[in-house]
Amino acid sequence: MLLSVDHVTRYRYDRPVRGVVQSHRLVPSTFDGQRVRDWGVTVTDGLAGGAFRDGAGDRVQAWTVPGPVSEIEVRVTGTVETVDLAGVLRGHRELVPAEVYLCDTLATQADAALAALAARALGEDGPLAMAHRLSALVSDAIAYVPGTTTAKTTAAEALAQGQGVCQDQAQALIACARHVGTPARYVSGYLFASDGDAPEAAHAWAELFVAGLGWVGFDAANRCCPDDKYIRLGSGFDAVDAAPIRGIARGNGQEILDVEVAVRQVQQ
């Protein structure tokens, strides 16, 4: 499938700030399931800094915007050719061992309720079957209801209230997987949403490490493994660590954030 992306993030400040520094993970991953045809990132008045590929295989680009700054627009445009690999991250080069992703974060710590949910997925039919059961259990336990959580909601909090968005479902799945000894990580990207899909073009899911297969994606929000409707950007321990844009503004101005994302299928 050939997918086009138009992703605009606008930052406005109620009073000018002295400058802004950002770190971007906005370039699609390189693996057998996707190939970039063309891709570009622009930042209003931005100066591109150093770029590198980190140990997890993600491309990281630094940007600086000198002040005074009242508004910044980060625009991402491009097309990506995707192939359905049934969620398997095949051909992705990275240096970090999978066991690193057994480490918990504040957002993905398993409380008693998450531990009990994870225990229900255990069985004698192998790690892949267990991972599928675990994803289904999280889908059942946390209903997809936009606007019911915030960016700071933890996996335990989302499970307690029984609803959330893709970020909450992914972090709950990660917390459960790690609790039973399965390395798991958070993935940010895009989704070409069709009928019945969670309608978030900017999307997130989890990857669990399955012996014999490697990293396998699970999207609890849509009860599936990522296919050719998905574009993978990057990964991390949780939503904050895998955020496509991270940064800091120097000054006391209040930040107002606005995000628009459109993913479309292109005729090949």
Image (cartoon, rainbow, N blue to C red):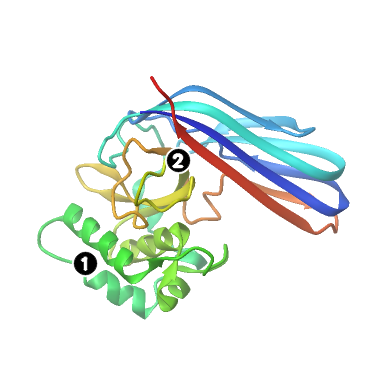
Q: In the figure, residue 32 lies in which quadrant?
A: top left
Which residue is at 47% across, 43% downward? 189
Which residue is at 46% across, 61% downward? 165
Q: Quadrant of the C terminus?
A: top left
The vertical placement of 149 against 222, above or below, is below
Left or right of residue 163, residue 131 in this image: left
Out of 129 and 96, give the one closest to the viewer: 129
Left or right of residue 98, residue 201 in this image: right
Q: Secondary structure at mark 2?
A: loop
Residue 72: percent from left, percent from top: 76, 41
Q: Secondary structure at mark 1?
A: loop
Give the mark nearer the N terminus: 1 vs 2. Answer: 2
Q: Quadrant of the N terminus?
A: top left
Of all residues shown, which one is farthest toward the front? Answer: 195
The vertical placement of 4 against 13, above or below, is above
Which residue is at 78% across, 50% downward? 12
Out of 216 and 259, give the one closest to the viewer: 259
Question: Number of marks in the image?
Answer: 2
Q: In the figure, residue 26 lies in which quadrant?
A: top right
Label 2 sits on residue: 56
Residue 245 appears in the figure: no
Left or right of residue 229, residue 54 in this image: right
Residue 265: percent from left, percent from top: 42, 31
User: Which of the two marks, 1 or 2, is nearer to us in this view?
Assistant: 1
Residue 14 appears in the figure: yes
Q: Amino acid at mark 2?
A: Ala
Question: Is disc 1 in contact with disc 2, using a CB cutoff of under 8 Å?
Answer: no
Label 1 sits on residue: 121
Of all residues shown, which one is farthest toward the left? Answer: 124
